[in-house]
Image (tube, grey):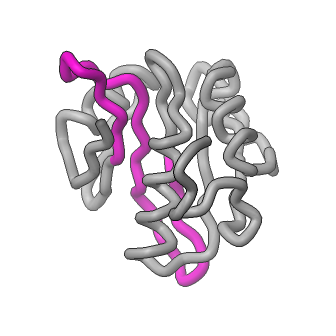
Amino acid sequence: MIVWEPNDVIAGWMGGKIGVRFSRPFVTVASVDQNGKIECAALFNAMTDFDVECSVVVDGRATVELLKACREYVEGQLKRPRITFRTRASNIRAHNALKKLGADQEGRLREYFGDEDALIYGLILRDCKYGIDTQRA
């Protein structure tokens, strides 16, 4: 199940996993299993005219459905053509999910998380492999 809203519980879960504290304003998108456990989540917390920044945390399995929900939110509601994702350099599951979606690795922020670098992925929505209407990943 996909849950998205400005949710402090999801933001706190994400922050605890990656060692940061998120401040409002933000919007969270999470994939939650049948028992209510968060499997992976994304948090949007910075926006310009052409881009919105997103942090990604994967604890169970990365779901393309979550990333499709992110795209739907950015393209459909925010009307932005691009998403910039930040994720820990060691978070291989998130990297693989972002690549499946069609994001390209664009850079590295050294010591962004204090103890670890962040990798930056950019997704131009017109290049996204999964459209809002896509039924299966």
Q: Residue at coordinates 31% horizontally, 57% vertically from top-left? A: 26
Q: Is residue 48 left or right of residue 6?
A: right
Tell me the residue at 45%/42% (across/down): 66
| 72 lies above or below 88 | below
Is residue 48 rendered magenta in the image? yes
Above or below — where is 92 with respect to 85?
above
Task: Reply yes or no: does residue 52 show up in magenta.
Answer: yes
Q: In this view, does 85 lie to the left or right of 96?
A: left
* Closer to the camera in the image, 134 or 65: 134
- Main secondary-structure element of the magenta-colored stretch: strand
Which residue is pictured at 74% across the width and 50% down the height?
102
Quadrant the C terminus occupies? top right
Q: Quadrant of residue 123?
A: bottom right
Q: Which quarter of the figure has residue 96? A: top right
Q: Position of residue 76 (x, y in %)?
A: 44, 75
Magenta range: 29-54
Q: Position of residue 128 (x, y in %)?
A: 70, 59
Residue toward you, 23 or 11: 11
Name the residue nearer the viewer: 61 or 46. 61
x, y percent for residue 92: 68, 21
* Image quarter hosting the N terminus: top left
Residue 122: percent from left, percent from top:
71, 56
Residue at the (48%, 42%) spot, across then down: 65
